[in-house]
């Protein structure tokens, strides 16, 4: 069994849940963009029928789905993906860096983002990052065997 497998599976599930949530928000429409903290400007664009909010949500969902695939690959649930170790380190770094906005909310200060959104989204993403970090750390020896990255 791969050390870190439960953590990487959990990280994959969290990333996949985030991806699915972003797609569901598109279906929920402007009120969902508002509720989940996308900001009034984005919600208004959705009300106007502009494609930008949906395109942003699909882009985020795609990145989260890729993160999930790499976590599942690291856990051994799917075939080994290219640059697995490098990708897991990069994904973890992005999650942790975004999560640390919790400590410096002014780093993402925008008039349309509330303090509540910045706090909760940062906390959630920091948890994602820590789960990926533990999983990657524990699985590192297994991920290194026979790898060229």
Image (cartoon, rainbow, N blue to C red):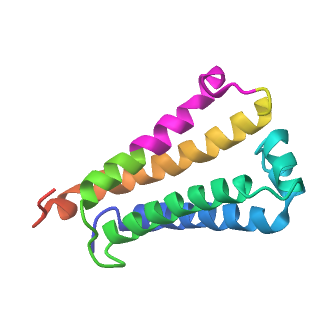
The image shows residue 114, relative to residue 69, as above or below, that is above
Quadrant placement of the N terminus: bottom left
In magenta, the rendered stretch is 93-110
| Quadrant placement of the C terminus | bottom left
**Eyeballing the image, is 134 above or below 106?**
below
Q: Is residue 63 left or right of residue 122?
A: left
Q: Which residue is rendered at x = 57% and y = 46% of the image? A: 125
**Percent x, y of residue 64:** 52, 59
| Count of picture labels | 0
The percent position of residue 144, horizontal first and vertical second, equals: 16, 59
In-image side of 112 versus 69 (left or right)? right
Q: Locate residue 37, reporting x and y percent.
A: 78, 44
* The quarter of the displayed image where residue 143 is located: bottom left
Seen at 56% across and 67% down, the residue is 16
Determine if the magenta segment contains residue 97: yes
Whether 26 is drawn above or below 110: the answer is below
| Residue drawn at 60 percent across, 23 percent down | 107
80 with respect to 112 (left or right):
left
Q: Main secondary structure of the magenta part?
A: helix
Q: Residue at x 65, y 25 (%)?
A: 105
- Give yes or no for residue 38 being in the magenta stretch: no
């Amino acid at each position: 069994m791969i050390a870190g497998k439960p953590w990487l599976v959990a990280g994959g599930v969290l990333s996949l849940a985030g991806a699915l949530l972003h797609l569901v928000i598109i279906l929920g429409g402007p009120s969902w963009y508002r509720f989940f903290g996308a900001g009034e400007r984005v919600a208004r664009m959705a009300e106007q029928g502009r494609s930008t909010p949906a395109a942003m949500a699909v882009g985020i969902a795609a990145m989260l789905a890729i993160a999930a695939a790499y976590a599942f690959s690291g856990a051994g649930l799917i075939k080994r993906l290219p640059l697995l170790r490098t990708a897991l380190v990069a994904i973890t770094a992005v999650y942790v860096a975004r999560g640390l906005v919790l400590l410096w909310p002014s780093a993402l200060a925008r008039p349309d983002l509330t303090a509540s959104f910045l706090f909760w989204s940062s906390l959630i993403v920091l948890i994602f990052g820590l789960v990926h970090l533990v999983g990657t750390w524990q699985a590192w020896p297994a991920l290194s065997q026979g790898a060229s990255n």
